[in-house]
Image: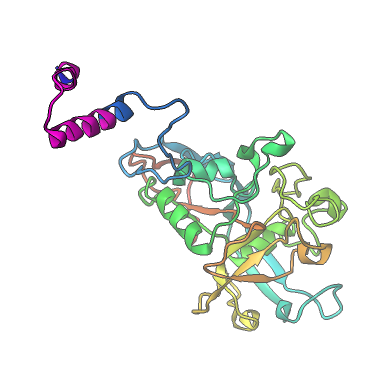
Amino acid sequence: MFFHGLTAVLAGRCRDNVALLSWVVLFAVVSALVFPRPGAAFAVNEWEKLDVEGSAAPPSVTVEAGKPWKEPLSGITFLWIPGGCFTMGSAPDAEGRDADEEPLHPVCLSGFWLGEREVTQQQWQRVMQYNPSRMHHEIVGQKDEGFPVENVSRLDVETFITKLNAHHQGTVLLRLPTEAQWEYACRNGGQKIPYAGYGQVDQMGWYQPNSSGTSHATGTRMANRLGLFDMNGNLWEWIQDNYDKEAYRQHDKNDPVFSKDTPFSVIRGGSWSENSNALRCANRGFERMTGKRPDLGVRLAATVDLQGPNTGGGAARTKGRGEMPF
């Protein structure tokens, strides 16, 4: 009918120029919509965030005391770190030490779970539905999925954690590790060692001399004796504690965490862009809560109520007794 009407107007040599012009414009618009020119496409934002609030809950996860377990929504594997006491900080004669690593002080920690690896780009995207990372690796024939997520602020990380915790209804609580927990885990459970194992530093982590100026897939250097990868190098990692140069003078002996209000968060571990001194287990870095860098990522810790019932909807089925603190 549309084309018949237009043909009639043209064939009849309509003298009403206004009507004729209206038909021509209408025909042009419809033609452009129905018959787009070759190569035309609708614009799509590749990393547009999707609404996942109504998505199906992940399956329940079984957590047994002292054993590894996998968070079902993200796919993050957590390892059990037995508690213990150690001396935190650096001795005055320690090589490469900084003033904020003093004083040496005793710390005793309850057992906790810690991420086996840094959170990957794939794990972040499963939860957040976008990939913020600046370091992409297709140019070297490797997929991004196994590479650590970076270019995320402390505030971004808190949003990531909140989304994960919403699926576990309180039985599982994911969070950032405390500074004391991170250093204890880096030191194989509080041993007096400078790096996260007994191998050479270039065997333990990616850093400036061996990284070729980029991050690398997680788990491609040696694990320490607790089974943790990339505690030295690859990416700096956000920590739960706020940063203060004098924080150690205010630490409690048992399960300390420094939470006084400051604009900076502690970061730990060094990165692909640093020298070996930055990779030391005792080294303390810091960054603004809003900071985003291609050498800064995240590793999560977890608390599990081993006495809590399985409430479904992504909650944990737990075995064993005892409640892990934090």
Residue sitting nearer the eye, 67 or 291:
291
Q: What residue lies at 30% left-to-right and 29% top-to-bottom?
A: 33
Q: Where, quadrant-wise, is the N terminus in this rendering?
A: top left
Q: Position of residue 229 (x, y in %)?
A: 71, 48
Q: Position of residue 130 (x, y in %)?
A: 48, 45
Q: Position of residue 166 (x, y in %)?
A: 37, 49
Indicate left or right for 18 with 304 as reference: left
Q: What residue lies at 69% left-to-right and 71% top-to-bottom?
A: 284
Residue 319 in sight here = no
Residue sitting nearer the eye, 156 or 302:
156
Magenta stretch: residue 10 in it? yes
Scheme of image coloration: rainbow
Task: Count the marks.
Answer: 0
Indicate left or right for 131 with 98 as reference: left
Residue 243, above or below 19 = below
Magenta stretch: residue 264 in it? no
- Decide whether the magenta segment is chiefly helix, strand or loop: helix
Q: Position of residue 316 (x, y in %)?
A: 42, 42
Residue sitting nearer the eye, 198 or 7:
7
Residue 222, above or below 270 = above
Q: What residue lies at 32% left-to-right and 29% top-to-bottom?
A: 32
Query: In this picture, which residue range is highlighted in magenta?
Result: 3-29
Which quadrant of the view contains residue 292? bottom right
Which quadrant of the view contains residue 309? top left
